[in-house]
Amino acid sequence: MLHEDRRRAGSFGADADRYDRVRPSYPDALIDHLLAEPAPAVLDVGCGTGIASALFAARGCEVLGVEPDARMAEVARRRGLTVEVGGFEDWDAAGRRFDLLVCGQAWHWIDPARGSAKAAECVRPDGRVGIFWNFGTPEPAALKALDAVYDRVEPELGAATVLLGHGRDDRLEIAASGLRETGKFTEPEQHRWTWTRRYTTAEWQEHLLSHSDHQTLDPARRAPLLAAVAEATDALGGGFDLVYTTAAVTARRLA
């Protein structure tokens, strides 16, 4: 499973500032949904640079982040967020309980069985868990052009990358199954919100490098891929629309 690839899991901090700069935020509707009930104390698992944490803090929540990469945690702290460094599965909650546990764009880097068991320890009875991702798909003309680039230059990467719409749906079911198997949560529910963001050629290049499968690609292979992607994006008029689906798995802690 993907969480076992620690090289990729640890690659984001190599340029934490770029990650923070180029990765998208999350729609207000997601935060509204997760805060439909008061959640004064929020735990953000795998908080990264604090992109999601900042949204909850802005709503008045007291947010604690847990992040395995000290370089990512440092960027989150510059936002004014409180972060403890460590892997969630082995993190010591020291008896603390939270009204809401969230995890944005990171649960696939956590052992689903151990992570779900830890979540059950950290969430108070009747508290909630919200695990979510942004999944982006290029508009049809861009997807056709980019698929052709990857088929020619990096077919194996192209067949697997989430950036072209692959390897996604199982993340939701893996998260739901892990929570379900603890026997300590209500039946997990899935929710989705759709929105669009436009990327220029330069912005898309940076976005690619914020993803672990591109970040860890051998530079001798990555350079011609990025050049070919830039050429294809320029041919589309210098940019394209990415249609995002923000997908969440939620469950309530049983008493």
Image (cartoon, rainbow, N blue to C red):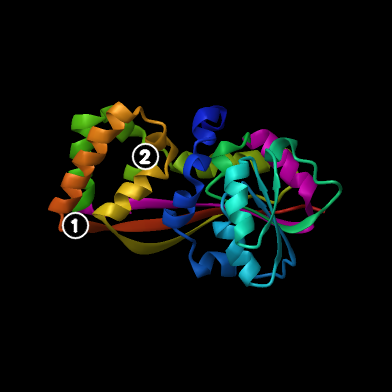
Q: Which one is in front, 35 or 240? A: 240
Q: Which one is in front, 102 or 94? A: 94
Amino acid under label 1?
Gly
Relative horizontal placement of residue 248, taking residue 241 as reference (left or right): right
**Residue drawn at the location 77% of the way across and 57% of the way down:** 98
Q: Are marks 1 and 2 in contact (CB under 8 Å)?
A: no
Q: Which residue is mark 2?
A: 166
Q: Which one is in front, 98 or 14? A: 14
Relative horizontal placement of residue 119, taking residue 59 as reference (left or right): right
Q: Which residues are magenta?
A: 112-140
**Residue drawn at the location 57% of the way across and 47% of the way down:** 72
Q: Which residue is mark 1?
A: 238
Q: Residue 150, how many percent across, how many down?
A: 24, 35
**Residue 56 vertical placement versus 224 (above, below):** below
Q: CA distance from mark 1 to mark 2?
A: 24 Å
> Which image quadrant is residue 231 in?
top left
**Of helix, strand and loop, which one carries label 1?**
loop
Disc nearest the viewer among 1 and 2: 1
Q: Residue 128, how many percent across, how many down?
A: 70, 57
Q: Where, quadrant-wise, is the C terminus in this rendering?
A: bottom right
109 drawn magenta: no
